[in-house]
Amino acid sequence: MTFIESLTAAWKTNNSLLCVGLDPDPAKFPAHLKDKPDAIFRFCSEIADATADLACTFKPQIAYFAARRAEDQLEALIAHIHEKHPGVPVILDAKRGDIGSTAEQYAIEAFERYRADAVTVNPYMGRDSVEPWLAYKGKGVILLCRTSNPGGSDLQFQRVGAGDTAIYELVAEKVAAEWNTTGQCALVVGATFPGEIARVRQIVGEMPLLVPGIGAQGGDIEATVMAGKTAAGSGLMINSSRAILYAGKGEDYAAAARKVALETRDAINRWR
Amino acid sequence: MTFIESLTAAWKTNNSLLCVGLDPDPAKFPAHLKDKPDAIFRFCSEIADATADLACTFKPQIAYFAARRAEDQLEALIAHIHEKHPGVPVILDAKRGDIGSTAEQYAIEAFERYRADAVTVNPYMGRDSVEPWLAYKGKGVILLCRTSNPGGSDLQFQRVGAGDTAIYELVAEKVAAEWNTTGQCALVVGATFPGEIARVRQIVGEMPLLVPGIGAQGGDIEATVMAGKTAAGSGLMINSSRAILYAGKGEDYAAAARKVALETRDAINRWR
């Protein structure tokens, strides 16, 4: 199955638009895990086990692993999810962006080494920087479009051409009309700007949108779903990381994570 | 010493604007290295030893290491350069770009784990995505401005505002006027567009420019130096990777690399 097919199946099977973000920060781990050499793997895999029937995707953020020489634990985590929860595809959040043979190396890293189903990619270097990713047929390529941080406006909100198109809209247009020839693309659009989610949805039709920024970053679930859902009430991967991962501080942290994931999934479903 | 101070000293001591790019592809290694478990480290460190008095910077590209589970060899390589060639600063070419706590993790990866002196960063997510890097005082933060690939024009050449400023010029303006409050910034400007190198130089004054794209990508040395040099005949890190690394195919590959590095340095110096 392709990433898009797996995602579509997970939306349905788990009745969920929730993406569980795996951003493991050992400083926030429960005490009983802290000194374990494989603490990062154990923490993330237990969260995955506790939430797999509630999620449409898992999204490990590679920086949290790389900062701690824990690439082996990231490999083990993705292998664990593929084995135990084959219905939930894995997005490697890496925001890579480079050209030619270097982009090919990054694609080997994400798709062959880590065996991710999809990856996040930065569009600043243009179409030929995206092609080495698309060469992996069936894998998902999720391009940054409108990010949820204040500085996102520095470039993304600049008006181009006759002055009525913002850069983030141009990215959405280019991806939808030119880059997505193989149906592998999706876009990142932050939850802090519901009007812009709606605008992107209008441009890209049914293309899936990965939406970070609810919870800790202040994005509103109702506004996000209303703005971003497709006609069929789907089309979204709404990410929550910290609110789920660190819902509990004790040995029952996975159960606490499940409780918040369930509430979040249901809060999203209320507006579909 | 800060990155900028080390770079300035290396420009002078080695009489060189040459950046030696370390993009190790084992398929292109000489036969006697191919089966060695530390082939990547050995290849790159021997190239570094053979060219250290001819270079102003070394630039390992992290994707080539990550694609082969060779993070330990990248750590060893940078440690080797710091120990044997302390006068030549190391740029980690990673083109990272993320926000908040994730950007902090990437900065830990580059500056604490790998001990790089500078890093390449993607500006698409705006100013607050750059701040966690700038928090490491003295480290270099080299932002993508105008890249040397054909698709670079997809976004970077879009005209904004009243229509006379391209996105890459806006990035140069923002970095020079707003983001570079601590003097740590530099820019990436590809050698394939000398007119645009000149335009960026005009905007940013004395700020160092990292220029990929000579040699394999077709950029012209004379045009690059004439367009990009400062009034003092300096200000550039002109990168060459493959032409140097793979100059020889036999056991004398390091000597062959030195010969090409020397010719390239001198070809650059002719136009300063």
Image (spheres, coloured by chain):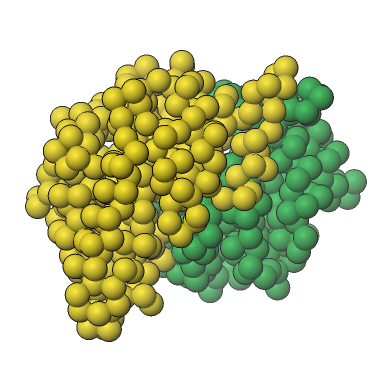
Chain colours: A yellow, B green
The image quadrant where one finds the C terminus of chain B is: top right
Q: Residue at x 69, y 28 (%)?
A: A159
Whether residue A21 is situated above or below residue B111 in the rendered picture: above
Query: Looking at the image, which residue sits at the far right?
Result: B231
Would residue B150 appear left or right of B35 to someone viewing this image? right
x, y (%) of residue A171? 53, 27
Query: For this rendering, which residue is in front, B180 or B243?
Result: B180
Would residue A117 appear left or right of B83 to someone viewing this image? left
Would residue A19 appear left or right of A147 to someone viewing this image? left
Any part of residue B200 in sight: yes
Query: For this rendering, which residue is in front, B113 or B77?
Result: B113
Would residue A187 appear left or right of B225 to someone viewing this image? left
* Quadrant in the picture for residue B72: bottom left
x, y (%) of residue B241? 53, 43
x, y (%) of residue B245? 48, 45
Query: For this rendering, which residue is in front, B251 or A126?
Result: A126
Q: Which residue is drawn at 39% across and 38% down?
A: A225
Q: Which residue is drawn at 75% across and 35% down?
A: B169
Whether residue A15 is situated above or below residue B46 in the rendered picture: above
The image quadrant where one finds the N terminus of chain B is: bottom right
Any part of residue B121 in sight: no
Please give the count of numbered marks on the rendered protein.
Answer: 0
Q: Which residue is drawn at 52% across and 27% down?
A: A199
Query: For this rendering, which residue is in front, B213 or A235?
Result: A235
Whether residue B137 is situated above or below residue B180 in the rendered picture: below
x, y (%) of residue A92? 33, 47
